[in-house]
Image (cartoon, rainbow, N blue to C red):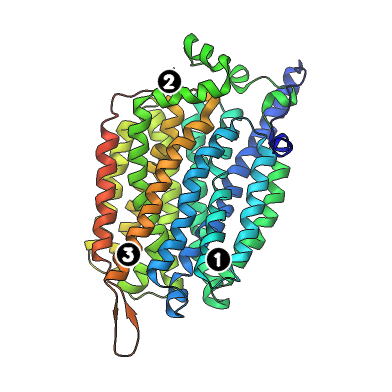
Amino acid sequence: MNGLLRIFATGADQPPLTDTARIGELYRRHRFRVMLAITLGYGVVYTCRLALSVVKKPLLDAGIFSPTELGLIGSALFYTYAVGKLVNGFLADHANMKVFFAFAVLMSALLNLGMGFSTLVWVSALLWGLNGWFQSFGAPAGVVAMTNWFSNRERGRFYGIWSTAHSIGEGLTFVAVGGVVATLGWRWGFWGPGALCVLIAIAMYWLIQDRPRTLGLPTVADWRNDHWQRPEARSLADAGVFRTQLSILKIPAVWVLALASASIYVSRYAINSWGVLYLQEVHGFSLVHAGTFLMVNTFAGILGCLAFGYISDKWFDARRPPANLLFALAEIAGLALLFYGPHTTANLVCAFVLYGLGLNGLVTSLGGLFAVDIAPKRVAGAAMGLIGIFSYVGAALQENISGHLIERGMTIAADGVRHYDFGPATLFWLGSSIVSMLLAATLWRVRLRD
C-alpha cells in the first residue's frame, strides 16, 4: 500500500526558476494543457459513466433487466462514486494529478469493456460499482489541477469552462454513443466508450503536470500576485494539509451546501439516467431522436456553465447566491415545461434550453465552485469530496427510488409490450429541484473566503 501511495504522491519541490520569461512561458503552456485535459478529456471520460443511460430500453425490451434491476445497477455506481469522491478528494490534495487522473481513466475504460459482456445483475452491479469508484477520481483531480494552475480571481470563469466537461460528455453519450447502440446493439454502448477512454488515459498522462513548484515554478498566487487569504487562514494551511482538510467540517455553510447539492443531483441524474427512456415512452421517440433532444440540453448546459462563472464573477462580484437563485428558477421552469407542457417540438426545445442552462449553472456552483470559494484553497479536493459524497448519495437514492416508481407504474399490453407511467417519478424530480433552491437561498449572505 505504501508503494502504491508513493506512485500517486506529488513530487518534491524543485529549485525555483529565476528567469521571468521562462516562468511565464511554462505557465502559459501548462495552463492550456491542463484545461484541455480536464475539460475536453474529462468530457470524453463521462461517456464511461453515462453509457448505461442509453442502453436501458434495449436491455428492457430484450428482457435482460427490469427497471428495478437497472436502478440497482445504476445506483451501485453512485454509491461508490459518493464514497470515492470523499476519499479520493482527500487523497487528491496529496497526489500527482498526472498519474492519479490517468490511472483512474484507464481503470474506468477497462470496466466499461467488461460491462459489454455481462448479462447478470450481480456482475453488472459489481462492475458498475467499481466503475463509480474510479470515476470518482475525476472531479477532485480536475479541481485540484485547476487550483494549482489558476488563481482566485480567475476561478469562477475557468471553473465554468471546466464544468462544461459534463455537458460535453452528455452530448457525446446521448448522440454518438446512442447512434452506435442504435446501429450495433447495446454491448457497443459500453465497448465504444471503453476503447476510446483507453486512448484518453494516455492523453491525460501526457497533458497534465504536477504542482507548479515541482517544476521549479512559483505558486500561481505568487505568479499572478493574487493573494486573498487572511493571515489566520494562511497559518492554518501552513500547519498541515490534513488539519486544514478537517477544518472544513466546522463551516456550517458547507453542510447546507452539501444538502442543496444532493437535492439538485437528484434532478440532474434523473434526466441523465432516465431522460432517454422518458422521451421514448412518453413522447414515442426513437433512441436517436431522444438523444438529439437531449443534445439541446447539452449545448444549453455548456452555455450555462460558462454563463454562471461569468455572471457570478462580473455581475455579483464573485457572489454565488444571487446567481444560484436565477439559475434555479430557470431550471425549475424547464422541468415544468418538459413534464407538463404541450407535446410539441418547440416546447421540448424551450424546456431543454431552460433546464440545461439552469441545471448546469447550479451544478457548477453547488457541486463545487461555491465549496471551493468558502474552503481553504490548499484543500480544494477535500471540499469537493465532502460535497461529492452528499451529491452522489442523492443521485444514488434517485436511481433506486426512480426505478421503483417507474416499475410500479408498468403495464403490459396484450401484445406483450411494456409501458411505463412516469407521473410519480417526475413529481419526485421536480420537488427535489425546489428543495435545492430553498436550501441554497439560506446561504445568501455567505461570501468568498478572502
Mark toward the start of the polypeptide (3 vs 1): 1
Residue 311 image offset from top left, x and y in percent: 38, 34
Q: Is residue 326 visible?
A: yes
Residue on which the image places disc 1? 123
Q: Residue furthest top?
A: 231
Separation of marks 3 and 2 at Cα, in angstroms: 42 Å
Asked if residue 184 is positioned above or below residue 77 in the image, the reply reads: below
Which amino acid type corresponds to the residue marked 1 in the rendered image? Val
Frontmost residue, 323 versus 99: 99
Frontmost residue, 4 versus 131: 4
Separation of marks 1 and 2 at Cα, in angstroms: 45 Å
Residue 380 image offset from top left, x and y in percent: 52, 30
Which amino acid type corresponds to the residue marked 2 in the rendered image? Arg
Asked if residue 37 is positioned above or below residue 336 in the image, the reply reads: above
Residue on which the image places disc 2? 449
Residue 274 image offset from top left, x and y in percent: 38, 63
